[in-house]
Image (cartoon, rainbow, N blue to C red):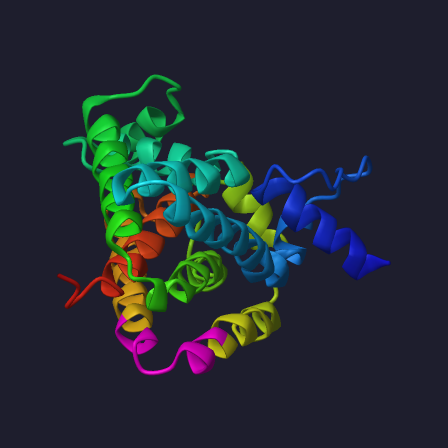
Amino acid sequence: MREFRALRTAFGMFSILPVGQSTDWQPGDSGRAAHWLPLVGLVIGGLTWLAWHLFSIIFPPLVTGVLSLLVGVALSGGLHLDGLADCCDGLFASTTPERRLEIMKDPRLGTFGGLGLLIVLLLKVAVLSSLPVSAGLGILLAAVLSRWCILPAGLLPLARPGGMGADFSVGLRRSSIVLGALLPLALLFLIGLPAVPAVLAALLAGALVCWLAKTRLNGVTGDVFGMLVEVTETVALLSFTIGVK
């Protein structure tokens, strides 16, 4: 029963899939559901891959890329893109860590946030437009690995005491990091050698995001987790296009 609750929490918070939400929310519930996040990524990535495959039969590459991206964004509810935009506005502002956190809480979209969204969305469209059929499973790996990256990031110091990031860190168990890694590792072995550069590049990009957050904010927040997902997913997808002409 507890694991079913955690599973519902993971899908309810990180996707728009109609699983319902628990009415008796307890502090740390999002962290206790952490080991299910790669599965959320697998479902979102799987549905996106299926849409990408079907669209590629009907439409030209560019249209396929745009429509596939829309499917992925819709399934996640745009949650991680929102975090990306907020982080770009705050992290790249020339001010104090306290002021950066205030900027990130501002619902208005700034110049850096708009540019960050534009760059990531254009890169994803470009990748989904040029990805060969043989590399289609890369969509699944990118979605799964990017969600797993939130788990180790949850062990980092918090930039603010409240919010989604704090709730996640409170309930997160170190064993969840190992358990959650089983799914991306399984995909790594399934895809084989082409997946190795994608995994390494994504992990490096994730480490860079965490370092930037630690340096500029003195810790992580829920928005940082969103940026982490978008950046690592984009970098992993890009790796599968290396050598594609």
Q: Position of residue 134 (x, y in %)?
A: 35, 69
Q: Is residue 6 left or right of residue 59?
A: right
Q: Residue at x 32, y 47 (%)?
A: 218
Q: Is residue 220 visible?
A: no
Vertical comparison of 151 with 213: above or below: below
Front-most of 150 and 183? 183
Q: Is residue 243 left or right of residue 28?
A: left
Q: On the image, which quarter does residue 232 sit in? A: bottom left
Q: Inspect the magenta stretch and tell me whether residue 7 lies in it.
A: no
Question: In the displayed image of the protein, which residue is found farthest to the top?
Answer: 108
Q: On the image, which quarter does residue 102 sit in? A: top left
Q: Position of residue 25 (x, y in %)?
A: 76, 39
Q: Residue at x 26, y 74 (%)?
A: 197
Q: Residue at x 82, y 38 (%)?
A: 24
- Numbered range of the magenta stretch: 187-197
Q: Main secondary structure of the magenta part?
A: helix
Front-most of 43 and 62? 62
Q: Is residue 189 left or right of residue 87?
A: right
Q: Inspect the magenta stretch and tell me whether residue 191 lies in it.
A: yes
Q: Residue at x 13, y 61 (%)?
A: 245
Q: On the image, which quarter does residue 173 sit in? A: bottom right
Front-most of 139 and 130? 130
Front-most of 34 and 165? 34
Q: Position of residue 161 (x, y in %)?
A: 50, 40
Q: Position of residue 238 (x, y in %)?
A: 24, 58
Vertical comparison of 43 with 216: above or below: below
Q: Is residue 201 visible?
A: yes
